[in-house]
Amino acid sequence: MKLLMFYTTEFWFKTFQKMLPDVPDADVERQVENAVVVFYQCESEDEDRFKTVLAKAVKNIKWLTRKFSTETVVLHSFSHLSTSKASIEFTESLMGHVKLKLNSVGYTIHETPFGYLNEWKIHVAGESLAKVFKDI
Protein backbone atom coordinates (compact mmCIF):
# COMPACT_ATOMS: atom_id res chain seq x y z
CA MET A 1 0.00 0.00 0.00
CA LYS A 2 1.14 3.49 -0.77
CA LEU A 3 0.05 6.51 1.27
CA LEU A 4 0.70 10.10 0.27
CA MET A 5 -0.51 12.22 3.17
CA PHE A 6 -0.87 15.97 3.51
CA TYR A 7 -1.81 18.14 6.44
CA THR A 8 -4.17 20.67 4.87
CA THR A 9 -5.68 23.84 6.16
CA GLU A 10 -8.27 23.54 3.37
CA PHE A 11 -9.25 20.71 1.03
CA TRP A 12 -12.11 21.07 -1.44
CA PHE A 13 -13.32 18.38 -3.81
CA LYS A 14 -16.10 17.81 -6.29
CA THR A 15 -17.03 14.72 -8.26
CA PHE A 16 -16.18 15.11 -11.91
CA GLN A 17 -16.67 11.84 -13.81
CA LYS A 18 -17.74 8.32 -12.91
CA MET A 19 -15.06 5.81 -13.94
CA LEU A 20 -16.39 2.51 -12.55
CA PRO A 21 -19.84 1.47 -13.80
CA ASP A 22 -20.78 -0.51 -10.68
CA VAL A 23 -20.29 2.27 -8.11
CA PRO A 24 -23.30 4.30 -6.94
CA ASP A 25 -24.07 7.57 -8.68
CA ALA A 26 -22.65 10.49 -6.76
CA ASP A 27 -22.69 14.25 -7.09
CA VAL A 28 -20.62 15.48 -4.16
CA GLU A 29 -18.95 18.77 -3.36
CA ARG A 30 -17.32 19.33 0.02
CA GLN A 31 -14.77 21.52 1.75
CA VAL A 32 -12.87 20.23 4.78
CA GLU A 33 -10.56 22.28 7.01
CA ASN A 34 -7.73 21.28 9.35
CA ALA A 35 -7.47 17.72 8.03
CA VAL A 36 -5.01 15.07 7.02
CA VAL A 37 -5.75 14.17 3.41
CA VAL A 38 -4.66 10.64 2.55
CA PHE A 39 -4.10 9.73 -1.09
CA TYR A 40 -3.92 5.92 -1.05
CA GLN A 41 -3.38 3.01 -3.38
CA CYS A 42 -3.79 -0.60 -2.43
CA GLU A 43 -1.44 -2.91 -4.30
CA SER A 44 -1.92 -6.52 -5.43
CA GLU A 45 0.64 -7.81 -2.89
CA ASP A 46 -1.46 -6.27 -0.10
CA GLU A 47 -4.17 -8.86 -0.68
CA ASP A 48 -2.09 -11.50 1.13
CA ARG A 49 -1.44 -9.31 4.18
CA PHE A 50 -4.73 -7.63 5.02
CA LYS A 51 -4.23 -7.35 8.81
CA THR A 52 -0.68 -5.99 8.53
CA VAL A 53 -1.59 -3.39 5.93
CA LEU A 54 -4.68 -2.35 7.89
CA ALA A 55 -2.73 -1.91 11.12
CA LYS A 56 0.08 0.05 9.46
CA ALA A 57 -2.28 2.30 7.51
CA VAL A 58 -4.24 3.22 10.64
CA LYS A 59 -1.03 3.72 12.65
CA ASN A 60 0.47 6.06 10.04
CA ILE A 61 -2.70 8.11 9.64
CA LYS A 62 -3.09 8.48 13.41
CA TRP A 63 0.59 9.44 13.76
CA LEU A 64 0.26 12.32 11.29
CA THR A 65 -3.06 13.56 12.70
CA ARG A 66 -1.50 13.74 16.17
CA LYS A 67 1.39 15.83 14.81
CA PHE A 68 -1.15 18.48 13.74
CA SER A 69 -3.73 18.05 16.54
CA THR A 70 -6.57 17.09 14.24
CA GLU A 71 -8.96 14.17 14.18
CA THR A 72 -10.29 14.92 10.71
CA VAL A 73 -9.22 12.71 7.81
CA VAL A 74 -10.07 12.72 4.11
CA LEU A 75 -9.50 9.48 2.19
CA HIS A 76 -8.92 9.71 -1.55
CA SER A 77 -8.21 6.73 -3.81
CA PHE A 78 -5.29 7.73 -6.03
CA SER A 79 -4.28 4.95 -8.40
CA HIS A 80 -1.21 6.81 -9.65
CA LEU A 81 1.05 5.89 -6.72
CA SER A 82 2.07 2.48 -8.07
CA THR A 83 1.80 0.28 -11.13
CA SER A 84 0.55 -2.54 -8.89
CA LYS A 85 -3.18 -2.48 -8.22
CA ALA A 86 -5.28 -4.53 -5.82
CA SER A 87 -8.77 -5.61 -6.77
CA ILE A 88 -11.58 -3.13 -6.31
CA GLU A 89 -13.24 -5.48 -3.80
CA PHE A 90 -10.09 -5.74 -1.69
CA THR A 91 -9.52 -1.98 -1.76
CA GLU A 92 -13.10 -1.23 -0.71
CA SER A 93 -12.92 -3.80 2.09
CA LEU A 94 -9.58 -2.62 3.43
CA MET A 95 -10.52 1.05 3.35
CA GLY A 96 -13.87 0.25 4.96
CA HIS A 97 -11.95 -1.29 7.86
CA VAL A 98 -9.61 1.72 8.02
CA LYS A 99 -12.66 3.99 8.34
CA LEU A 100 -14.23 1.78 11.03
CA LYS A 101 -11.05 1.72 13.12
CA LEU A 102 -10.58 5.49 12.91
CA ASN A 103 -14.27 6.20 13.57
CA SER A 104 -14.22 3.94 16.62
CA VAL A 105 -11.64 6.18 18.31
CA GLY A 106 -13.33 9.48 17.50
CA TYR A 107 -12.02 10.47 14.09
CA THR A 108 -14.22 12.25 11.57
CA ILE A 109 -13.74 10.63 8.18
CA HIS A 110 -14.59 12.19 4.84
CA GLU A 111 -14.10 10.31 1.61
CA THR A 112 -14.06 11.29 -2.02
CA PRO A 113 -16.42 8.97 -3.92
CA PHE A 114 -14.59 5.78 -4.91
CA GLY A 115 -14.56 5.11 -8.63
CA TYR A 116 -14.79 8.76 -9.63
CA LEU A 117 -12.44 11.31 -11.02
CA ASN A 118 -12.61 14.36 -8.80
CA GLU A 119 -11.50 17.91 -9.09
CA TRP A 120 -9.87 19.32 -5.97
CA LYS A 121 -8.13 22.28 -4.40
CA ILE A 122 -5.65 21.69 -1.65
CA HIS A 123 -3.84 24.10 0.67
CA VAL A 124 -0.99 22.19 2.27
CA ALA A 125 0.75 23.62 5.33
CA GLY A 126 4.40 24.59 4.93
CA GLU A 127 5.95 22.40 7.62
CA SER A 128 8.09 19.51 6.44
CA LEU A 129 5.82 16.95 8.15
CA ALA A 130 2.81 18.33 6.28
CA LYS A 131 3.86 16.13 3.36
CA VAL A 132 4.52 12.46 4.10
CA PHE A 133 4.87 9.42 1.81
CA LYS A 134 4.65 5.90 3.23
CA ASP A 135 5.25 2.60 1.47
CA ILE A 136 3.59 0.00 3.71
Image (cartoon, grey):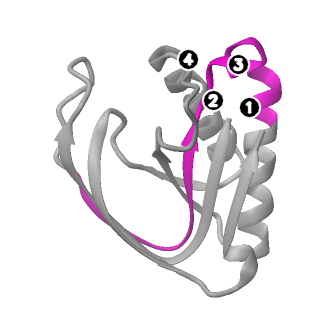
Read off the magenta span: 28-55
| Quarter of the image with the N terminus in it | top right
Which of pointers 2 and 1 lies earlier in the amino acid sequence? 1
Amino acid type at circle 2 is: His
The residue lying at 32 percent from left, 64 percent from top is 120
Q: Where in the figure is residue 133, as x and y percent of width and height? A: 70, 57
Residue 42: in magenta span = yes
Which of pointers 2 and 3 lies earlier in the amino acid sequence? 3
Q: Is residue 69 visible?
A: no
Q: Where in the figure is residue 111, as x and y percent of width and height? A: 43, 48
Quickly name the residue at label 3: 45
> Measured along the vertical axis of the image, is residue 124 above or below residue 96?
below
Helix, strand or loop status at disc 1: helix
Give residue 97's mark: 2
Tell me the distance, in whole angstroms, between the alpha carbons under discs 4 and 2: 11 Å
Which of pointers 1 and 4 lies earlier in the amino acid sequence? 1
Amino acid type at circle 3 is: Glu
Amino acid type at circle 1 is: Leu
Q: Residue furthest top?
A: 48
* Label 1 neighbour load within 10 Å: few <14, some 14-19, many 20+: some
Which of pointers 1 and 3 lies earlier in the amino acid sequence? 3
Give residue 54's mark: 1
Tell me the distance, in whole angstroms, between the alpha carbons under discs 2 and 3: 18 Å
Frontmost of labels 1 and 3 is 3
Frontmost of labels 2 and 1 is 1
Amino acid type at circle 4 is: Phe
Residue 1: in magenta span = no
Helix, strand or loop status at disc 3: helix
Q: Are marks 2 and 1 in contact (CB under 8 Å)?
A: yes
Tell me the distance, in whole angstroms, between the alpha carbons under discs 3 and 4: 11 Å
